[in-house]
Amino acid sequence: MTFRTLLIGMTLLAGCGGGGAAPSPAYGCDERQGSATPKRNECVDYENVADADLAGLQQSCEMVSGGRWVGGACDHAGAIGGCRVAVGNGAPATVTEVQWWWTGAAGGVVTDHASAVRACASFANSTFVEP
């Protein structure tokens, strides 16, 4: 699953729920431990997601991304780094995601710290996050 595919999935979820509840802590979609084949060396933290959107986000993680839903933030142990972006495309402005990368992530593009920084810089309004 590419970073852009996850953004599209969040776009689809933007119309679901989304009212009233206070934002939640980070929730993760671990694509290293899900059903995706081949396994991906990525995990996505979703930040500031309203409680009303959690069920749809979990379904997208498992059914679209082939990931395993994590009831909290991803385990960042051994990660090369992460890339934070606002989800946008109709989702609440406060929702962000951090795509955490390990060696071989992003279709093999991410191989070390420098390549992770470059990959993150290729996304508009992104911020590289140290593990």
Image (cartoon, rainbow, N blue to C red):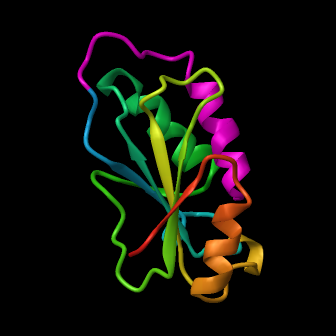
Instruction: Specify whether residue 11 is painted magenta.
Output: yes
Q: Is residue 102 above or below residue 96?
A: below
Q: Looking at the picture, how far across and down is residue 79, in whole percent?
A: 45, 80
Taking the image as drawn, is residue 87 in sight? yes
Residue closest to the eye, 5 or 94:
94
The C terminus, quarter of image: bottom left
Quarter occupied by residue 115: bottom right
- The residue under the point 40% across, 54% down is 28
Residue closest to the eye, 55 or 51:
51
Q: Looking at the picture, how far across and down is residue 70, in whole percent?
A: 35, 55
Q: Is residue 128 above or below residue 130?
A: above
Residue closest to the eye, 122 or 65:
122
Q: Is residue 55 above or below residue 129?
A: above
Q: Looking at the picture, how far across and down is residue 96, in whole percent?
A: 47, 42
Quarter occupied by residue 60: top right
Number of labels in the image equals 0
In the rendered structure, which segment of residues is drawn in magenta? 1-22
In the rendered view, does 37 fall on the left or right side of 87? right
In the rendered view, does 45 fall on the left or right side of 25? right
- The residue under the point 57% across, 37% down is 87
Quarter occupied by residue 13: top right
The N terminus, quarter of image: bottom right
- The residue under the point 70% across, 37% down is 8
- The residue under the point 57% across, 85% down is 113
